[in-house]
Amino acid sequence: MRMTARNKYRRHSLVVTVILMVLMVSVSLLALRWISQFEEGECFDRLYEETGKLARSIERNTVSDAEKLEVMAALAAEAGDLSDPEFWEALDSSSMTEGITHLAILLPDNSILTAEGRQPAGQNGLSFEQEAAPGTHISDRETDEAGRYVIRHYAPVIKNGETIAMLFCTIDLHSLSEKMKAFAYGGQGAVYIIDGNNGEFLMDTWHKDLGNIWSLGERKMAPGYNHEQLKQGLSDGERNYVVFVSETTGKYLYFYYEPLQINNWRIAVSVPENVVFSSVNNTRRILIGFLVFEIVCFLLYFLWILHYSRHEANEKQRQLDEWRSEQN
């Protein structure tokens, strides 16, 4: 009877051990899944936050530059002669203090005044009537006389209630892209500014040349995403993301975009998947390591019980054999 009871106890121990092992592994897997999902949400929040911070910074700088230009335009309105070298010295001194460069003045006859002199109308392709109509504003992507992509920031020079000229600064978009390279994920991501009207890049910190995002129609995307979705989202000013497949590494690139409060522009940040989910991957490695440790511990315990049970059975069999030998 004692043998039977012990056998039942051993079997019961084995069953309990197996059930506990299954329960612990199941709970650990559920915890791993829940924590991973939570961490993924945190990573997406960071992607949205990084993009939002960049957007707000660009918007603030644009407003600040507009205010500085308006102050300098007021200085120009008080000048007697806009071609006077002393006026340009004062203007250049003010612009250096405010961080504004490449200043020029567009006149009603479409000619341009700079510190170096006058450029005749038609040489630059600018229209005073067109640029004066919206008042203080920033242009979309344009090409200057040297063939470079630029944007121009304008402020009206108003005298006696009449716009007599348009003061503007020119920003080289290639230089702007170079300055912004380190701003997304410590330089591991890329920053883009896109014209929502036509898909033209005004900033692209990843590629050497500025192109058009609509021309990426052949670029491979992850399952569930398509180029029409991206084009519609950018045109409509949505906050959304798509996932590209990197042409160089074959890995996923997360491309998040949202509207800027400047013209019809959009800002976008693209980040490799391993960078976006770096904290998730670290957490997963830790949790998987703990799960493996649990399984190993349970397996060792299970093997010990099996070994102990076999040892007990062998010992009982040996005692039984000895008893039988004594009886014979």
Image (cartoon, rainbow, N blue to C red):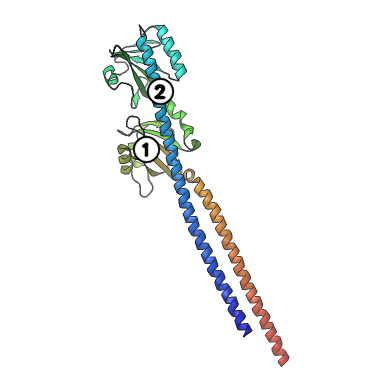
Q: Earlier in the sequence, mark 1 or mark 2?
A: 2
Q: For residue 65, which numbered disc appears in the image?
A: 2
- Asked if residue 35 lies left or right of residue 66, the reply is right
Q: Is residue 248 visible?
A: no
Q: Residue at x 33, y 45 (%)?
A: 226
Residue 44, how many percent across, how many down? 44, 44
Position of 111 relative to 263 (above/below): above
Residue annotated with mark 1? 258
Say what secondary structure mark 1 lies in.
Answer: strand
Position of 73 relative to 258 (above/below): above
Q: Residue at x 41, y 30 (%)?
A: 58
198 or 186, which is in the foreground? 186
Q: Residue at x 36, y 22 (%)?
A: 153
Packing grade of label 1 (10 A; few <14, some 14-19, many >=20) is many
Q: Residue at x 53, y 49 (%)?
A: 282
Amino acid type, label 2: Asp
67 or 305, which is in the foreground? 67
